[in-house]
Image (cartoon, helix red, strand yellow):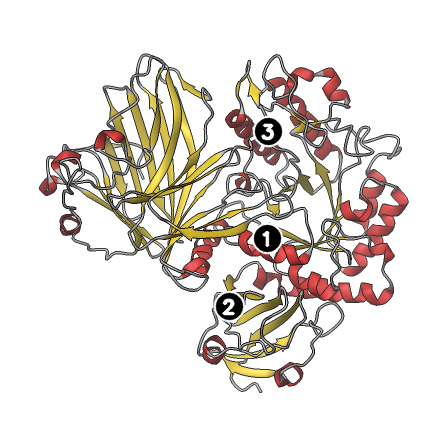
Amino acid sequence: MTDHLAAAAPDTGAAAAAYAHLRGGGVSLLVDLGGGLPQHAGMPTVLHWGSALPDELDCAAAALALAPPIPHAAPDTRLRTPLVPMPVDGWRLRPWLEGSRADGTGWSPRLVLRAHEHAAPACLRLELADETTGLALEIDLRIDEHGVLSIEQTLTNEGDEDYLLGGLRAALPLPSRADELLDLTGRWCRERAPQRHRLALGSWVREGRRGRTGHDSPTVLVAGTPDFGFRHGEVWAVHHAWSGQSTYLAERSPVGLAQLSAGERLEAGEVRLAPGESYGAPAVLAAYSAAGLDGLAACWHGRVRARAGHPQTPRKVILNTWEAVYFNHRLDRLTALADVAARVGVERFVLDDGWFGGRRDDTRGLGDWVVAADVWPDGLAPLIEHVTGLGMEFGIWVEPEMVNPDSDLFRAHPEWMLQVPGRTPTTWRSQHVLDLANEACFDHLLERLDRLLADHEIGYLKWDHNRDLVDPGHDGGRPGVRAQTLALYRLLDELRARHPGVEIETCASGGGRVDLGILARTDRVWASDTIDPLERQQIQRWTQLLLPPELVGAHIASDVSHTTGRRHSLAFRSATALFGHLGIEWDLTTLDGARLEALARDVAAYRRLRPLLHGGRVVNGDHLDPSSQLHGVVAHDGGHAVFSYVQLSSSPFELPPAVPLPGLTEQTRYRVEVLPLGGGPGAQQIAGPPWIADGLIADGASLGRIGLRTPVLHPEQALVIELTEVRDGAS
């Protein structure tokens, strides 16, 4: 696409209208650049977003066919869905842009096309403006080869006075058949819990007011045809690629119009544009699938995996020390733990909280990023040399955005907090939030982190963020969430530029910051602070609606979960962690030889399967029994697959039903075998079907349509099976 914009020819009616048909990945976006109707002259409208349209589409005929009637008791115009819906058009749903001049004027701009550039087939760049209000809006629309539409916008104040921006969202129309919604909610240790309801008349609004993405973030907002599932139904979805505050919106009006929308949630006065200044809105990503939620996930996963910075090397098995030792850092204990970790196949050893300053518990020392001399009199070098000498990479935990009141940093610079002048912010986990947009604070943190990485052989940072932003005042008390988020991005970008070989994990008291904005700068997410495998079955399933498994940290913990108190077998814990970026969070020095051998075999199974797990297509079964679920990964060529059948609770049925295995190639013959985990056959069964013992060879058509009988499983057990293609001549 060239750098210039072509001046838009004036449109006076349907005959003169120009059209832009964006397409990619089986998705089309059809835009009428002139509005197509006299009352919409120069105001682009969306004619279609969804399934692919023919390349040689008669756009004018489509526009005429979609021209609506004029209803009774309504404006005397034909209401269409503008690309930038505003009240001036008679639009009665949420407008795209909200704001005004300081004196209250300029609140209702009429943004018309000033220039455009259509780089077929996938890109459209528009410049709209309203000379009366002195506003200009540039919109970049792009559909990638996976069918994901990105919407990036820049609003510029071309007037002579300041403009107070209230919000700039992106909205896309929904067809009338999309009348059911799904989004995610949650809390600490129960992130990304799904909720569904009908899209009735009115608005469904989800606002993030936490200063970060939040444990209760919708993550994606999905609209679909009635009763859509993982493998069926049409679905339309939006994701806001931003780590600050967001608004997600779905609404339908009695007129019959509906839209799906997302954008940054701004506090009053947070963005004030002086003459000539611009606001760049965080990107909104939209996807469509005719193949249910699995099709939608394939769109997101394809886009994420195509990023230039996506991890390309095998995802190393991690041992994280947190639940193994907590704050009890002793060189002898940690080196002994590293010895056992190396024996079971761990490839990265991560030292968690407690290595710096006066940090002997979670109430003090945070912010003092110097190695604690009383705990590490010879520094970290002895531990790092021991770990790397065993062939493992060394990683370390940091939480740079926070500070304890009981710390040297806070005592020296209390003015570096996010705060409204004249009052002390509320503590949360004995922490305050540092104002990263304060240049002196930013420079200090950058220097400390840069020094840490330069002085030690560190290949991995676990970057934590353990509280919401409450009363986050910046620059004399103005709202500071947007400035804080942009400063965080800048800090991460600078560290990565200086230390390009270091991987960074984003953790926010678990899964409180999971979005594609932070993942543009990090290499994996910590999906939740709970490692209870029963809770993780749901958390990981719904996190992977957006993110591919290789970006989702999933650990094997001790027998008894530290967050729920539940006890689970190693087989169930391994079966759960297998379907992510596997790690261990467990004091392995307490295990006997047999248990270590069982764990080592599970780690070896992950290392053998990770090319499939981290490169294949994620699939889920639409299972009728809510007490169980099926999920898996299938290679893109269909020749290799691994599935997990999970019994979540007791079933109402004595015999489990035959379970279809989705995503297989129908003509391929597969050898079906149980993957032994936890030192046993993979499940403690009361009675098993014959194939469990004797093995099975079957074609993908029968496995996918008729299904496979599973054993009778106890609650909180999983059966993991591996399918490999049987080549011609093989028995």
- Above or below residue 171? Residue 342 is below
Badge 1 marks a residue whose secondary structure is: helix
Label disc, if present, on residue 613 of the rendered structure: none
Residue 435 appearing in the image? yes
Q: Choose between 90 and 523: the one closer to the eye.
A: 90
> What amino acid is at disc 1?
Ile
What count of labels does the image hold? 3
Residue at x-position 70% and y-position 61%? 573
- Mark positioned earlier in the residue sequence (2 or 3): 3
Crowding near the residue tagged with mark 3, few <14, some 14–19, many ≥20 C-alpha atoms within 10 Å: many
Residue behind mark 3: 469
Whichever of labels 1 and 3 marks the residue nearer the N terminus, that label is 3
Q: Residue at x 68, y 66 (%)?
A: 605
Instruction: Name the residue that disc number 1 marks.
Output: 539
Residue in view at x 13 percent, y 36 percent: 76
Q: Is residue 471 left or right of residue 2?
A: right
